[in-house]
Image (cartoon, helix red, strand yellow):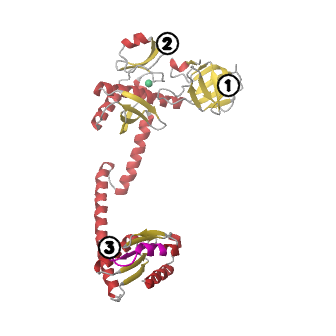
Amino acid sequence: MTHRLYYHDSSLYTFEATVLESLEREGKRAVVLDRTAFYPTSGGQVHDTGKLVLGDERELPVTEVAEEDDGRIFHFTKEPLPAGTVVRGRVDAARRRDHMQQHSGQHVLSAAFVRLFNMPTVSFHMGAESCTIDLETTGLSPKQAEQAERLANEIFLEDRAVTIRFVPLEEARQLGLRKLPPKQAGDLRLIDIADFDLTACGGTHVRSTGQIGAILLRKTEKVKQGVRLEFVCGLRAVNAARQDYGTLSEAASLYSAHIHDLPQQIRKSLEDSKSAGKAQHKFLEEIAELHAERLLAKTAESSLVVSEVFPERDAVFIKLLAQKLTAKRPNVVALLAGGLGQPSLVFAQSAGHKFNMGQLMKDAMTQLGGRGGGTADMAQGGLPAEAVDLAKLEKTLREIAARL
Ligand SMILES: [Zn+2]
C-alpha cells in the first residue's frame, strides 16, 4: 500500500520516497513507491504528471498515475527502477493547481445546486479543456444555471477556508454530508468548505475558495440521468473567455459590427440570403422557360427530341429546363447536359411517353464513365469532373437522339 501524501497536503509538490517494486502493467512500466504526492486518476479527477529524480540527478518522466484496488499507486515511467532506490518526486505544479481549481470549483458548484434548487450531482468528469457534472433533475433553465454560477463565484470571493479531516463512518453519517461514498474501509476523508459544503472526497483541493478564482458555466445537455453541465474554473475560465472573445471579434469584424450586435446581424444575413435564393430561383425558372421555348421552336414538330449541352449551367438548371420542356407538350424527349460544377446529364420525356429514360441514362453512363439512373420519364447522371469533354458529351447526346 502506498502512503498518500496528498491526502494531507494538496500543495506538496516535492517529496522523497523509496521504490518498493517495478512492474509491467498493460505493456507499460510502472514504479510503486512507499509514499507519494502524485495523484492517481480517481473520483473524477485526472492524474498528475511530473518526474522522479534519482541520486545522480537523472530524471524519469512520470506520464500517468493509477491506483490499484489493493491501495498501491502505479507511477508509469519509461524505465524500471530497482527496489530500494531512493527518489525525489516532483509533481507538475501548474497541472496540479489547475486540477485543484477545477475539483474544488466542482464542490462549490455542486453545493450551490443543492442549496438553490435541491439538484444533487451524480457524477463529475474532468477533461483536458473543460469539466462536466451530471445533475439529477428533469430540467435546468439558463436562469437557474446563472444563479448557481453567481453563488459559486460569490463563495470564491468570500475566500472561505477549505480543510481536510478524517472521521469514522458512523460519525460522518451524523454530519449531513452532501455525498457519502458507496463503500469505505476505515475513516472517511472529508473536504470542508467553511459553512458551505461538507463532502467525502479523495481529491486534491485548494486551501481556500479564493484560489479557485472564477467559474464559468458553459453548455448544458440532456443525458439519461438528468442534465450534463459543462464548466471551467480558474485560468481555464479566463482562457475560455479569451478564446470566445477572439472568435466573436473576428466574426464581428466581418460584419463591421459590435460583438453584441452579432446575433441580429447574422439573423439579417440569413434572411437576406434566403430571399436572394428565392429571387435566384425565380430567375432560373424564367430563364429555363425562355430556353424551353427557344429549343422547342427550333425542333421539328415530328421528332420533338431536344438535345443540348450547357457548358455554363449546373444540374439544378438542366433539371428545371427538362421539366419545363416535357410539361409544355406531349411526346417531348429532352436530352440535356450541364458542364458547371460536377458535369451532369438529365434525360426526361413527357409523362407516359413511349421511351425509357432510366435505361437510356444507364447506356450513356456506361459510355461516358459516370453513375446515374432513374424512372422511365426522368433520369439523372453525374460524371467525374476531370472526365468532362464537352465535344464527347455532345456526340453522345446526338447518338442517343438518333436512336429515338
Ligand atoms: Zn471531490
Number of numbered markers: 3
> What residue is disc 2 on?
186
| Amino acid type, label 3 | Leu
Residue at the image point whose x is 38% and y is 32% from the top: 134
> What residue is disc 3 on?
284
Segment tinted magenta in the rendering: 344-364
Question: Which numbered disc, 1 or 3, marks the residue that appears first in the sequence?
Answer: 1
Q: From the viewer's side, name the closer residue of 377 and 317.
A: 377
| Amino acid type, label 1 | Ser
Question: Which numbered disc, 2 or 3, marks the residue that appears first in the sequence?
Answer: 2
Tell me if 285 is positioned left or right of 85 in this view.
Answer: left
Tell me if 340 is positioned left or right of 273 in this view.
Answer: right
Residue at the image point whose x is 44% and y is 76% from the top: 360
Please identify the residue farthest to the front as the structure is shown.
354
Give the Cα distance between marks 1 and 3.
75 Å
Quarter of the image with the N terminus is top right
Q: Is residue 339 visible?
A: no
Give the Cα distance between marks 2 and 3.
79 Å
Q: Is 397 located above or below residue 217 in the figure?
A: below
Give the Cα distance between marks 1 and 2.
28 Å
Q: Is 287 located above or below residue 175 in the figure?
A: below
Tell me if 191 is positioned left or right of 46 in this view.
Answer: left
* Crowding near the residue tagged with mark 2, few <14, some 14–19, many ≥20 C-alpha atoms within 10 Å: few
